[in-house]
Structures are given as structure tokens and as C-alpha cells.
Image (tube, rainbow, N blue to C red):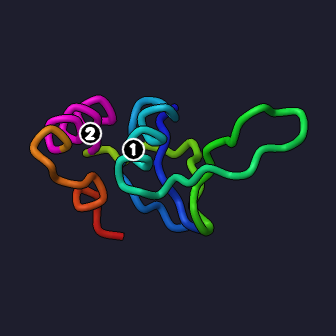
Amino acid sequence: MPYALFCNEARLSNAYPTEADVWKLARKSGLVVEAVSEEDRPAPRPVLENDYEIRPCPVDPQEDPLRNRADAEREAARGVQWDTLAPDA
């Protein structure tokens, strides 16, 4: 199942093939911060800012998660942020 970025119940991004794809894009967009680690962890861990979360999502019939990933990678190489590619919500 594909994954997307959400805030509360609103889907904010295109669907991507893996959760790791969305983490990568969220990091590039500045939505990931390093949280103070818990005692059993030696280093800070990445978390999403505010009420953002990455969750599985259904794919719209006209959407292709693999193509979304390829488009995002191509746009990132050109310096365009991924959140400008998000569908209108």
C-alpha cells in the first residue's frame, strides 16, 4: 500500500510507493526535526513537525505512486520542493 503525508485527517501530498519515500521528501522539505532521544537510544531520532504524520493511503484512480516518486526526484534535482507538487485538497 502506498503512503502519503497527512496533517490530522487531511492528505497533504501525493501517494508514494513506500513510507521511506515520504520520509525522504519530508526531510528535504524541512518537515523533519531531530527529537531528544530516550534513555535507551544513543542518538536523537527523526520526527515530523507539528501534527504531520506519514500513513498508508488509498491511491486515487488517476494517480501512480511510482510516477509520483520519479517526478519528485526529478523536481528535487531541479530544486523544486515536493510540496508544490501536492494535489489540491
72 falls in the magenta region: yes
User: In the rendered structure, which segment of residues is drawn in magenta?
Assistant: 63-75
Image location of residue 45, percent across then percent down: 67, 41
Seen from this angle, which residue lies furthest front? 42
Image location of residue 51, percent across then percent down: 62, 67
In-front residue for pair 25/87: 25
In-front residue for pair 72/43: 43
Looking at the image, is mark 2 or mark 1 earlier in the sequence? 1
- Residue holding disc 2: 68
Q: The disc labelled 2 sits on which kind of residue? A: Asn
What predominant SS class does the magenta segment belong to?
helix
62 falls in the magenta region: no
Q: Which mark is residue 45?
A: none
Please identify the quarter of the rendering in which residue 59 is found: top left
Q: The disc labelled 1 sits on which kind of residue? A: Ala
Secondary structure found at label 1: loop
Secondary structure found at label 2: helix
Point 58% across, 55% down: residue: 48
Q: Which mark is residue 15?
A: 1
Image location of residue 55, percent across then percent down: 58, 46
Question: Mark 2 near mark 1, Cβ–Cβ under 8 Å?
Answer: yes
